[in-house]
Image (spheres, grey):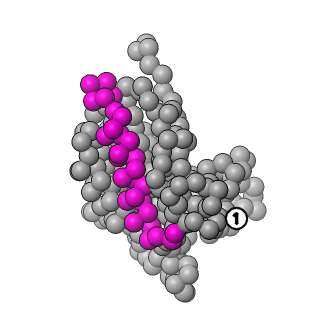
Amino acid sequence: EYNASIEFYWAPFLVESNTEVNILEPKKRIIKVDSVSKQSKNWEGADILAFNTYVWWMIGLRLKTLWGSFANGEEGYAQLDTPVAYKIGLKTWANWIDSTINVNKTRVFFTTMSSIHSKSASSPSSLSNLAFSRSKDWGREDGLKCFNETKPVMKKKFWGSGSNKDMMSVVAGVINKMKVPVSVLNITQLSEYRIDAHSSIYTETGGRLLNDEEKADPGRHADCIHWCLPGVPDTWNQIFLAHL
């Protein structure tokens, strides 16, 4: 009807990494923070570009980052605090936008972080599992991640540990210094309330639905990152459409 085509391009870090297809182990993940050239050739010429990147960065307190070739990756990487690596990667993306995008032709959007709800009431026993277990995000002592949650959080301005404010500040800082205007779609706060809206045990892994044994172990298998459809992402799309 509008002679439009919509494309989805998989680039979980926006910048390059060795992890996107063949290497899935987070411990082997190396992020090449100084280049988007592999991906950006697919972005050129679009009338509208909508970017986001967050959850793949959140695998630990520090990340293996690299400048230059992956050929020397095992020897040439540096470990940086996650917000620092994120900032360098976003600056690389921002430099490409500022040097390439024709503002008379293309509109650019950036969607803020999608909230994660996997920390209902369990308490960390050691520093090593702090990233996966934070105490009482929404006060459910008997809670188990997002499993069996049927109502949104009703507390005003609720903010869980699954949305990192340091990372959100990085986005604001980088975008505020760009020459090309970027419209920020802030979906984080509205998504925070919806602990009830994830796919939970009705998710899939490796291209298949969970079996009965996996469904019976939501502490391990409940998916509190992705969202049910129809659901919360439809609200994000309504906001996006309003901007357009």
Above or below, 116 relative to 129: above
Magenta stretch contains residue 82: yes
Quick one: 201 or 151, which is closer to the camera?
201
Where is residue 215? Give x, y as percent. 69, 60
Quick one: 223 or 85, which is closer to the camera?
85
Residue positioned 64% across, 66% down in the render: 74
Residue positioned 41% across, 27% down in the render: 46
Q: Amino acid at mark 1?
A: Ala
Quick one: 81 or 217, which is closer to the camera?
81
Residue positioned 50% across, 78% down in the render: 130
Quick one: 219 or 125, which is closer to the camera?
125
Question: In the rendered structure, which segment of residues is drawn in magenta?
Answer: 78-106
Q: Dot 1 corresponds to which residue?
A: 216
**Quadrant (top left, top right, bottom left, bottom right) of the C terminus:** top left
Where is residue 1? Give x, y as percent. 43, 12
Q: Residue furthest bottom?
A: 125
